[in-house]
Image (cartoon, rainbow, N blue to C red):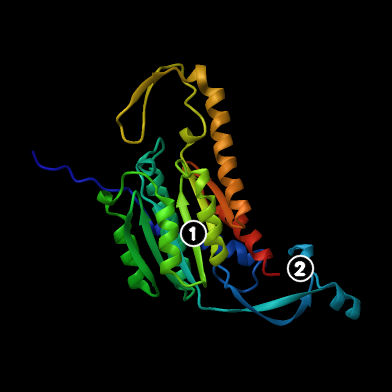
Amino acid sequence: MPKIKRFFKVDLIPAIKRLEIVSKGLVNTRIIGNYLSVFRGRGLEFEDYTTYTPDYDSRAIDWKASARASNLLMREYIEERDLNVFFVIDASSNMLFGSTNKLKIEYAIELIAGLTHAALESGDRVGFVLVSDKIVKKLYPDKGKKQFYAISKLLLNVEDYGGKFNFKDAATFLINYLHESTIVIIVSDFANFKQEYEKELKLISKKFDVIGIMIKDPIDKALPKQKVQIVIADSAGKKTMVIDPSLISQAYEREMREQEKKIHDLFSRAGADFLNIQTDKSYVGPLIKLFRLRALKWK
């Protein structure tokens, strides 16, 4: 019998256009001035003072300079650009699930492609590591259109996905592989992210600027409301169980909320940023909100 060829349903061009909306949204709100990317450089050099406007957070005000000028002033900075953006991508079996028109990994690949394109257009370097039980694939950060096509092609190989997400090995890899001037973006559903990983998360957050992006399917948050019995299975497909969603829905939703809160708290204690998005919703709004908050760190 011939082998059935499997492939991901991924639309890269719409993903790129959605990230252009994010970039324009940040510029139009004057959150990051004239910088046309969703990323911030780590090195900042003071350039001048400018008049404070309500578009900015009040923490941006330089009170000493304002007192001297009898006007509310804030500092403006120019960025020293030599930035690496590096994705840590969960390639586990959990990411191959989807109750919407997108698997979690398909949604993730489109998001990563959009962010990659935005970073490369800004002259930054982009790379990634694909992680399951082991390091599956890696690509060192580089610039240019060839890098975009290389990343996109490598991520679309269905055969590279399966198993569990071994974050401990991923953290060791990052520390030994990357320079400090790197933004590390961890993309996962964090379903198997253990409490014991907090040590590794804090370690990489001390060396890198870390962002966690949690991608969830609607069923990761709540069971279907229909009055039917459904069959559930573990990620390996070895164990199955028939359940009535109406009998366990409240307990399930409570457990899912607690799990998400634990992951968010882990990132918060590590000093890392965190974003929670869902495959049946656009990531544009949440990304704009995240990068607005990040921009305030540089004011």
Picture disc at residue 185: 1
Helix, strand, or loop for circle 2? helix
Question: How far across and down, in percent of the image, does residue 64 sit?
Answer: 86, 76
Mark 2 = which residue?
A: 60
Q: Is residue 77 left or right of residue 132?
A: right
- Distance in Å between CA atoms under marks 1 and 2: 26 Å
Query: Is residue 25 positioned above or below 52 on the image?
Result: above
Question: How far across and down, in percent of the image, does residue 92 sit?
Answer: 36, 45
Which quadrant does the N terminus fall into? Answer: top left
Which quadrant does the C terminus fall into? Answer: bottom right
Mark 1 and mark 2 lie on one chain; the one further toward the N terminus is 2
Q: Are marks 1 and 2 in contact (CB under 8 Å)?
A: no
Picture disc at residue 69: none
**In the image, what residue occupies the spot 56% across and 23% down?**
250
Task: Tell me which corner region of the image, top left, top right, bottom left or bottom right, holds residue 51.
Answer: bottom right
- Which-is-in-front pick, marks 1 and 2? 1
Instruction: Report crowding for label 2: few under 14, some 14 to 19, many 20 or more residues within 10 A (C-alpha).
Output: some
Helix, strand, or loop for circle 1? strand
